[in-house]
Image (cartoon, rainbow, N blue to C red):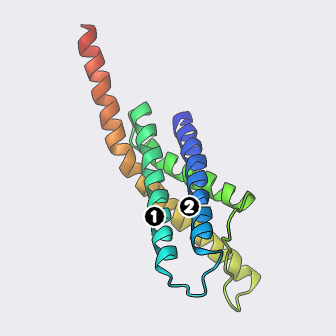
Amino acid sequence: MLSAAKWGAIVGVAIYIVSQAITLIGQAALGPAPADPSHPGKIALGCVDLLLIAFAFSTSGFFAGRETRVAGYGAIAGMVTFAVYGLMLGLIPLGSRVMLAQGGATLGQDVLIGIITIVIYLCIAALIGWLGGRPGAARGLAAARHASERAK
C-alpha cells in the first residue's frame, strides 16, 4: 500500500508540473485565450495534455505493480495520482484553467455533479492504473524468479 501511495504521489506531482508547462507553453505560443475556441494549436495541446495524464495513471500503476508484484496496487496508485494531481491543480492553479459552473444549477446540484464527476474520474484512474499494474506485476514476478534461479 505504501508503494502505491509513493508512486501515485511522485507521478502526480510530475504530471502536474508537465501539465502546467504545457499550459504555459500554449499561452506563450498562442496567447492567453484565442478568439476562436476551436484553434488547432489549443486543441492539439489539450489532446497531448490529456494523453499524458492518462499515461501518468498507467505509469504509477506500473511502478507500484512492479515493486509490490500485485496488479491491484496499480489501481490504488492511479487513484492517488489523480488525487494528488487534482489537489495540486486546485491549490496552485497556474495558467488559465477555469472551472465552468452549470448554468441554472442549485448548490445541491453543483455538489452532486462534483461528486459524480470525481467518482467517475477515480474509476477511470483506477482502471488505467490497474492496466499499468498488470505488466508491472508480471515484470516484478519475473525478476524475482530470475533472482532466485541465479541464487541457486
Q: What kind of residue is marked 1? A: Val
Q: Residue at x 61, y 47 (%)?
A: 13
| 152 to the left or right of 101 | left
What is the quadrant of residue 95 in the picture? Answer: bottom right
| 10 to the left or right of 100 | left
**Would you place residue 87 above or below residue 120 in this image?**
above
Total count of labels: 2
Report which residue position mark 2 lands on: 22
Q: CA distance from mark 2 to mark 1?
A: 9 Å
What is the quadrant of residue 100 in the picture? Answer: bottom right
| 134 to the left or right of 44 | left
Camera-nearest residue between 7 and 46: 46
Instruction: Determine crowd level at label 1: few under 14, some 14-19, many 20+ residues with C-alpha closer than 10 A.
Output: few
Can you give x and y, in whole percent of width and height, for residue 76 in the image? 51, 47
Q: Residue furthest front?
A: 29
**Would you place residue 78 above or below residue 26 in this image?**
above
Report which residue position mark 1 lands on: 48
**Would you place residue 20 above or below residue 46 in this image?**
above
